[in-house]
Amino acid sequence: MIGRHLLSSADLDRHDIETLLETAASMHDVQRRDVKKLPTLRGRTIINLFFEDSTRTRSSFEIAGKWMSADTINISAKGSSTSKGESLRDTVRTITAMSVDALVIRHSASGACHQAAQWVDASVINAGDGTHEHPTQALLDAYTLRHRLGNLEGKHVVIVGDLTHSRVFRSNVITLGTLGARVTVVAPPTLMPSGIGDWSRRDGFATRWELDDVLYGDDPPDALMMLRVQRERMSGGYFPTAREYTVGYGLTRDRLDRLYAVSPDLPILHPGPMNRGLEISAEAADATSSVILDQVSAGVAVRMAVLYHLLSGDPQQHSQGVSGQDLDRGAA
Ligand code: NCD
């Protein structure tokens, strides 16, 4: 059952994910209306507390809250008292002392959201904690993939890039695995997280070093997710040159042409922000089968669904999904 917080993708079983994706589909319909305001979360207060930069995640949580009539406020580390030395504990306790209902937190430390959830009564939503997890990203990726591929049971999703620093990959292997997809992750040995062997056996995904073998082998991908090279988290040399990375692991125009010769509709995903020319070429990012902007659009619908289920306070709705009419009436 969807609980009070959303801290990890492992918090969600298959039924929870199905329920959230179903609600997100209703929310997506609302997104297409001229007037997007729903009364659903009227009187609720949501704070976006971002200690790391963000474009998509923060704005989509803000839009999601606003479209459901919640009062949403953004606080970023720059410009808050954390830049004066206040601890995370003091910051979150200070904010929640103002009777907020939900805290959406992004922080550079893995585990920061779990910690925060111990300290406050509000619902805590993990919007990315260090190199740990990013559960709403995995949900919006699943939503996007389902829209393109239908049921994900048995579908082969290939995730390529800087796995060491990627919370998106960590949440995705959990959510995609829960939905029955087969996941292969590909990275150079230096960007494979240590201990991934045990972990891949436990969570049932495959790890590979050779991208071309995976792309053009006997089990071609049904979808391809490229991940950003997170240079801001790298202290040493993880690969010799950017050019070498692109040659080995980038979705170049040549690789795309070869893939398209066999599967011209192959969905191409990237959580953004993209390093065009490094992990993904402009041709791939803007290709006809690229769903990168669909991911952004799904991000609002999925975050509306998450806020709705965490804050609407109606346990019946939690297990049954939600209809357009319920939304217009307001659930709370
Ligand atoms: C990702 C993140 O911040 O984890 N971006 C996002 O939320 N859309 C991935 C990244 O930064 O590369």
Image: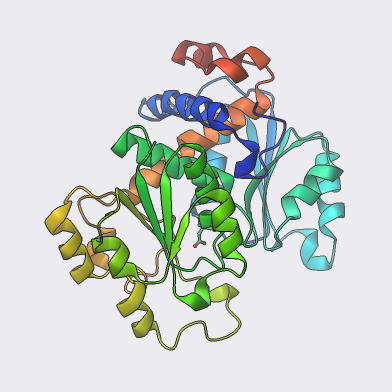
The residue closer to the viewer here, 153 or 137, is 153
Q: Position of residue 287 (x, y in %)?
A: 22, 56
Q: Position of residue 117 (x, y in %)?
A: 79, 43
Would residue 233 appear left or right of 280 to someone viewing this image? right
Would residue 332 appear left or right of 80 to someone viewing this image? left
Query: Image point 51% across, 82% down: which residue?
Result: 238
* Count of numbered badges drawn on the protein: 0
Would residue 246 appear left or right of 273 to someone viewing this image? left
Whether residue 72 is situated above or below residue 40 in the rendered picture = below
The reply to whether residue 311 is visible in this rendering is yes
The residue closer to the viewer here, 234 or 189, is 189
Position of the N terminus, as image quadrant, is top right
Looking at the rendering, which quadrant does residue 26 occupy? top left
Query: Image point 27% across, 52% down: which residue?
Result: 290
The reply to whether residue 227 is visible in this rendering is no
Whether residue 22 is situated above or below residue 10 in the rendered picture = above
Query: Image point 57% across, 28% down: which residue?
Result: 16
Q: Position of residue 255 (x, y in %)?
A: 22, 67
The residue closer to the viewer here, 12 or 109, is 12
Looking at the rendering, which quadrant does residue 71 occupy? top right
Whether residue 164 is situated above or below residue 150 in the rendered picture = below
Looking at the rendering, which quadrant does residue 271 occupy? bottom left
Q: Position of residue 59 (x, y in %)?
A: 52, 47
Query: Image point 81% across, 33% down: which residue?
Result: 99
Query: Looking at the image, what colour scheme do you see?
Result: rainbow
The residue furthest left is: 261
Position of the C terminus, as image quadrant, is top right
